Image (spheres, rainbow, N blue to C red):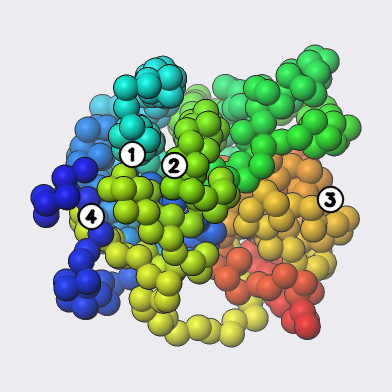
Amino acid sequence: MDKNNNDAFRLVSDKERDFFLKEIKEIDWKYWLNRPYTVFMATLFWEGVREEVFKRNGFENLSPDNNLYQFPDLYHDSNFLKKGEKYFDEYFKNHKMADLSEDLEKLHKRNILEFKKLIIDNSKTIPEKTKMFSDLMQDYIPSIWIITSLEDYFNKRIAVEIPKYIEGDYSKFVGDISLPNKKNVYVLMLDEIKAGVSDEEIVKKYGWMKSRDGFTDFYTKEEIEEIRKGIKEQETHNVDIPDGLLELSGELKELNYFRTSRTDKFYEFFGVARPLMKEIAKFIGVGFKELAHYDINSIILEQPKKYSKDFSYGLIGNRYTISNEKIINFSEHDNTEVKGRTAFKGLVRGVARIVTHPDDIGKVQEGDILVAQMTFPSFISAMQKAVAFVTDEGSITCHAAIIAREMRKACIVGTKNGTKILKDGDLVEVDAERGVVTILERSK
């Protein structure tokens, strides 16, 4: 990284920080997601949202430009979603969802090979390897970032095309015609477990799936054994799809596969990179998990800097700042109701359990309401116990919606702020007939 080039991705200096903060506060920020990122993840991840990275990965003029993160809340510039709407309206005139999946697959295979060469290259220093690791990771970010815009595009198509053939509530129909034909990594793992592959081999091949931040422990043999015990045969869905919806159905199937595939590949790369991350921690003289609190770019510059867990991060173009305090104090509202979209109907009451990390799934007990930003395959054991799911993100074709229909459990998705308003231990009513979650009694 060029220490003197003002166009390079860089931490703003103390001298320009006040003016930079003034710029950040003038942006029209919209609350987006709840994400318990580490400093290491954030400084690695958001370098990948630059225009330069989007452009080299085929997404010119689609980068977010500006970002604000105040643990654990992520905000986006109000112009971001408008850019995505315009971009994909043009993109799908000449492309299919399969093009995105295939491009990502090629990138992943290339990056794994490049990294394996890097890890054994003794001619490079740890800071040099760290920079190359960062560069490789950045190329996954555009595929991760575009999912909201993709869902917006297909939700518009669903709203226009489905009512031509299906009357009334079509959410279950859309879910059934959206089940992917391709198998994601979790399904492949379950196939191998059912085929009798040993716990040791499963851990070796798929252990990384539990770690969604690069630092969480991998699956253990005991955890794989629990998954093995909980495996149930899923019902098959034979759906009569009108000819006029066959093309849309194929695109939705590919969208659902892509949604999981993009994060699978990102976190698999993180898993493969763990040996280097341990070397980086040793190089700066800290324990592996303490590395999570360091700005990766400060390590590349050989000036390691640590921040608190409750950090804030602001980005404008190529410039960023990190603070141990909030950059902007947004007003809080004591709402007692959360609204979203019904993915599977039902009316249940239970205790809310906020699950923002794989380490949280153990607190979900039989009869609880699982509340998450979004659900992942690693959440399945908790979803089996819960009576309903509530998510910040997603639409009627997302992972939580698909699993809810398979398990026949009430599910509300796309609440935006469920994990922000609901508190762990709240007694809530999930009315998935109306898409409303009501707090009946606050936890003490």
Q: Name the residue under label 2.
A: 283
Q: Earlier in the sequence, mark 1 or mark 4?
A: 4
- From the top left corner, tell me how far across and down residue 270 is, in percent: 50, 35
Please determine whether, in this image, residue 354 is positioned above or below residue 397. Answer: below
The residues bearing labels 1 and 2 have C-alpha atoms spaced at a distance of 9 Å
Determine the residue positioned at 22% across, 50% down. 9
Determine the residue positioned at 48% across, 48% down. 285
Query: Label 1 is placed on what type of residue?
Result: Pro
Q: Which of marks 4 and 2 is nearer the N terminus?
A: 4
Q: Residues within 10 Å of mark 4 (few under 14, many from 20)?
A: many
Query: Label 3 is placed on what type of residue?
Result: Lys
Circles 1 and 2: CB atoms closer than 8 Å: yes
In front of the other: 325 or 394: 325
Question: What quarter of the picture does the N terminus occupy?
Answer: top left
Circles 3 and 4: CB atoms closer than 8 Å: no
The residues bearing labels 3 and 1 have C-alpha atoms spaced at a distance of 45 Å
Query: Label 4 is placed on what type of residue?
Result: Arg
Query: Regarding mark 2 in the picture, which secondary structure is present there?
Result: helix
Q: How crowded is mark 1: few (under 14 residues within 10 Å), some or many (20 or more)?
A: some
Q: Mark 1 points at which residue?
A: 127
Q: Mark 4 points at which residue?
A: 10
Residue 174: quarter of image: top right
Query: Regarding mark 3 in the picture, which secondary structure is present there?
Result: helix
Circles 2 and 3: CB atoms closer than 8 Å: no
In front of the other: 182 or 289: 289
The residues bearing labels 2 and 3 have C-alpha atoms spaced at a distance of 43 Å
Query: Label 2 is placed on what type of residue?
Result: Phe
Q: Which of marks 3 and 4 is nearer the N terminus?
A: 4
